[in-house]
Amino acid sequence: MTVTQEVQSELVEYLLRAQRERREVEKLTAKYPDLPIETAYEIQAQLIARMEADGERCIGLKLGLTSRAKQQMMGVHEAIYGYLTDGMLALEWEPLSCQRFIHPKAEPEIAFLMGEDLAGTAVTAEDVLRATRYVAPAIEIIDSRYENFRFTLPDVVADNCSSSAFLVGSKWVSPHEFDLALTGVVMSKNGVTQTTGSGAAVLGSPAAAMAWAVNKLGERGLGLKKGQIVLSGAITEAIAFEPGDVITVTVDGLGSVSFGCQ
Ligand code: OOG
């Protein structure tokens, strides 16, 4: 079945409703098995435009499936990107209600705060570091709108890459102060270590992952803007959590970021 413009609009509403009603839905490829990845990015763009029309503000980008651990976990072979809105930004000192999620999982990440605009199709990790003002430890909470968190690459792209919420730690450091590829990361739940990794897990380094995303955006005539936050992709596999759990991510040299779900 071809995904006409009209069908795309229907799929945007379908995903938006699932998100707002916190309900799992059948993945798009169950009905449209040949959904092209480019069409999935168009659906994603329309979904963000709809969220903006309803008052949310786009404040950055997130990368997904940048590590082998995540690609194996989801059975895919390619990285992806989606958008972050102000409605997704959670604060460490505010309670986070689990009721806003369907089946959430936490991932340890490095956040980049852009000091300059960055666009192009031959952007390198060095260009990314030059354009970055600060890096900080971050937690991304992903919450696929699809049943059992199972999907193909076009499905997850259309669903804005499972984006749901994120937290950024309060220690912001210049990226030139240490080697992000060698930086160790530990994620714990209720004080018990769950996953460990280093920055190199994401396409060689978080800056390399960022360069990949900027070049992908460049192919579509898009780029990053000064002031935007970018999450450079999960460094380890994701872990599920429930009300009462406290998740902490500690990054060597950057300190910790934590949340408790109620
Ligand atoms: C897709 C999003 C994964 C990451 O950093 O790898 C992601 C998913 O697993 O639901 O955000």
Image: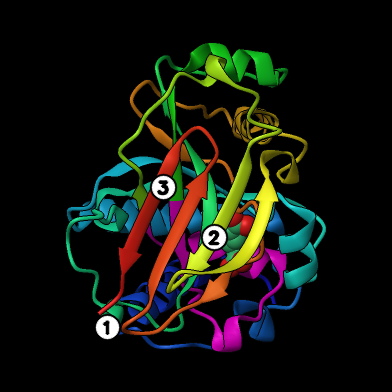
The residue lying at 54 percent from left, 54 percent from top is: 108
Q: Which of marks 1 and 3 is nearer the N terminus?
A: 1
Identify the residue at image location x=73%, y=52%.
Answer: 67
Q: Judge by depth and name the residue closer to the eye, 105 or 185.
A: 185
Kindly report which numbered mark, 1 or 3, lies closer to the viewer in this rendering. 3
The residue at which mark 2 appears reads as: 187
**Image: 187 above or below 246:** above
Quarter of the image where the C terminus is located = bottom left
Q: Is mark 1 on a helix, strand or loop?
A: helix
- Is label 2 in contact with label 3 (beta carbons under 8 Å)? no
Amino acid type at mark 3: Ser
Residue segment shown in magenta: 139-166
Earlier-in-chain disc, 1 versus 2: 1
Residue at 43% across, 40% down? 255
Instruction: Residue under label 1, please give it.
Output: 99
Q: Is residue 2 left or right of residue 108?
A: right
